[in-house]
Amino acid sequence: MTAQTNPGATTKAGTSGATEEEELRRELAAVYRLVHHFQMTDLIFTHISARLPGPDHLFLINQYGLMFDEITASNLVVVDLDGRLVRSAEGAVVNPAGFVIHSAIHRRRPDANCVLHTHTRAGCAVAAQEKLLPLNQMSMSFYDRVGYHDYEGVALNLDEQERLVADLGRHHSLILRNHGLLTVGASPAEAFLRMFYLHRSCQIQVDALAGGGPLVLPPPEVCEHAARQLEEGEDSDDYTDELGLELTWQALTRLVERTYPDYAT
């Protein structure tokens, strides 16, 4: 298994003495900074939400109006499933309309503890095409493992939620046609690593199509084999990398700590 494709084994940093919510706040703030660092932001728009532990169905999300490089562990706000503020600093606001997509998935996918949505240039370009192509080893990890949701206008209509969740199905990645990309994960780290490689796959596709020459696609059986290798390491004759996922997240955390040391405040 390679670190680039299946971040399902990523874990929390485990800061000594921190509560579960404090650790989650730091991990989510780190992901906001990483999305900024890798230029996947859309000014103050789009969200990354993370489910808080407990039975109350509450979520951490960014304050509306902050750039992603301004997000810290302490200025994340708490909202309910309808995007209403439950806990926040004085004067903080949240964009409830932007939470329509997130709340739909959080309601129906209990495994989706984190939902990450982007409007990147390459992601929007591929969202305007028929589908994500298995052009590269990175994109093969999404082979038959990404959903597609047709554009219905700005995501303000609650009626769209049922269709969006149905189109995601059991996948962990969704291409919102004419809109952008979405990934889910058991943790913010997992959702981010999926998004990093979904976005990178879109960049490769845009570049390959811009080359103008004929594209070379592996046979379907090879694509499926590669997807299983990268996703599960099922083949007993294949080598596996049991450390790559955790080491990747540790390296990314060090990058955030070096570059944006205020993220954990």
Image (cartoon, rainbow, N blue to C red):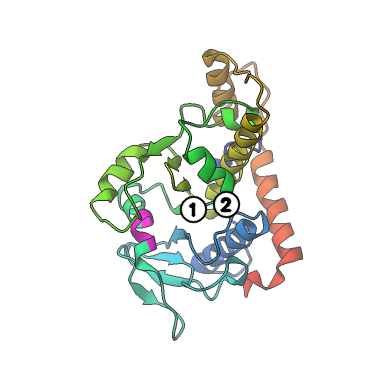
Q: Position of residue 149 (x, y in %)?
A: 37, 40
Magenta stretch: includes residue 101: yes
Q: Is residue 10 shown to the viewer in this render?
A: no
Q: Is residue 7 left or right of residue 261?
A: left
- 6 w.r.t. 249: above or below: above
Specify the quadrant that holds the N terminus: top right
- 48 w.r.t. 67: above or below: above
Q: Is residue 178 shown to the viewer in this render?
A: yes
Q: Main secondary structure of the magenta part?
A: helix
The residue located at (64%, 57%) in the rendering is 34
Q: Nearer the viewer, residue 177 or 5?
A: 177
**What residue occupies the far front of the structure in this picture?**
212
Q: Position of residue 54 (x, y in %)?
A: 37, 63
Q: Nearer the viewer, residue 110 or 219?
A: 219
* Amino acid of disc 1: Leu
Residue 116 image label: 1
Q: Is residue 114 left or right of residue 243?
A: left
Q: Position of residue 120 (x, y in %)?
A: 56, 50
**What residue occupies the far left of the structure in this picture?**
159
Q: In the structure shown, which secondary structural element does the residue marked by tag 1 occupy?
A: strand
- What span is in magenta? 98-102
Quarter of the image for residue 168 reads top left
The residue located at (68%, 29%) in the rendering is 211
The residue located at (32%, 44%) in the rendering is 165
Quarter of the image for residue 96 reads bottom left
Cα distance, mark 1 to mark 2? Answer: 10 Å
Q: Which residue is tagged 2?
A: 189
Q: Nearer the viewer, residue 123 or 7?
A: 123
Q: Position of residue 158 (x, y in %)?
A: 25, 56
Sooner in the amino-acid sequence: mark 1 or mark 2: 1
Q: Nearer the viewer, residue 83 or 264?
A: 83
